[in-house]
Amino acid sequence: MSKQANIMLVHGAWADGTCWSKVILLLEVKGFKVTAAQIPLRSLSDDVAVTRRLLSAVKEPTVLVGHSYGGAVITGAATETPQVKALVYITAFGLDEGESLESLASQGSPSPGSAAIEPDTNGFLWINREKFHDSFAGGASTEEAAVMAAVQKPLSLASFAGKETTPAWKTVPSWYLTCTDDKMIPPPAQEFMAKRMNATIRSVASSHCPFMSHPEAVADIIALAAESLKN
């Protein structure tokens, strides 16, 4: 496979495709072709469908990357897209069949950051803007976190409850970047999901948003997955 391998990045809740800005530039310097999806966050099935539509325009072998909720999206989207040859989870949900974010969240103690999540009257979940920096984007600068909080894209309750169907990680090689300072997805939960999918694991001392504070670590594990396709 050439260095022009396609890499598609899928954002999670309370973010959009621009959250990958630093990582995109690093990957392009390495010679990769990069696309960042913009998913609606209205339901898991809709987000999977949007990602599959984007992938349908790609013919070359692709590394599909998901952050947080985006992990659930790539887990479903890669099942009917044979050009996806590797999955990369960035402190992300690698759900099994029948699981949802809601079901996993109910299995253990609430994460420290969950106290910052607030529902509105329209069926969407937001992060309290005053708590955004500490809970979600620790490690980002004050200015970066303020902008992220202002433009956050809410997650629907339907997405939170959406159940995974056939998990692609059972057949597609996977990589997982664990973030040891994450207040949204507890590090033990990250380890559990990464080991369950038999992923190649790397770790960084980062908050839930390593693409802001440690973009090199994010770009490196994605490049590692892409390079493996040459073998």
Image: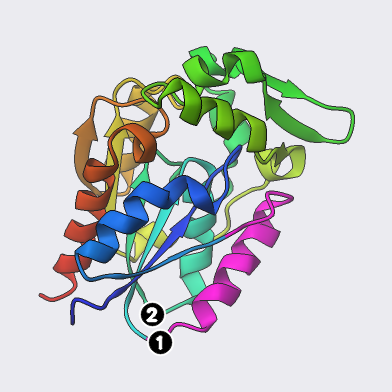
Assign a secondary structure to mark 1.
loop
Q: Residue at x 19, y 73 (%)?
A: 229
* In magenta stretch: residue 47: yes
Task: Give the quarter of the figure containing the C terminus.
Answer: bottom left
What colouring style does the render use? rainbow
Q: Residue at x 28, y 65 (%)?
A: 28
Q: Position of residue 120 (x, y in %)?
A: 83, 27
Q: Quadrant of residue 121?
A: top right
Q: Quadrant of residue 4?
A: bottom left
Cα distance in 3D space between marks 1 and 2: 7 Å
Q: Nearer the viewer, residue 3 or 107?
A: 3
Q: Looking at the image, tell me whether mark 1 or mark 2 is earlier in sequence order.
A: 1
Q: Position of residue 144 (x, y in %)?
A: 48, 30
The answer to whether the residue labelled 1 contacts the one labelled 2, judged by CB atoms less than 8 Å apart, is: yes
**Structural crowding at the residue carrying mark 1, measured as other residues with C-alpha within 10 Å and reported as few (<14), some (14–19) or many (≥20):** few
Asked whether the viewer can see residue 182, the reply is yes
In the picture as drawn, the residue positioned furthest to the right comes out as 121
In the rendered structure, which amino acid carries the disc numbered 2?
A: Gln
User: Magenta region: which residues?
Assistant: 38-59
Task: Give the quarter of the figure containing the N terminus.
Answer: bottom left
- Numbered mark located on residue 59 in the image: 1
42 with respect to 52 (left or right): right
Asked whether the viewer can see residue 173, the reply is no
Rendered position, 171 above or below 12: below
Which residue corresponds to mark 2?
83
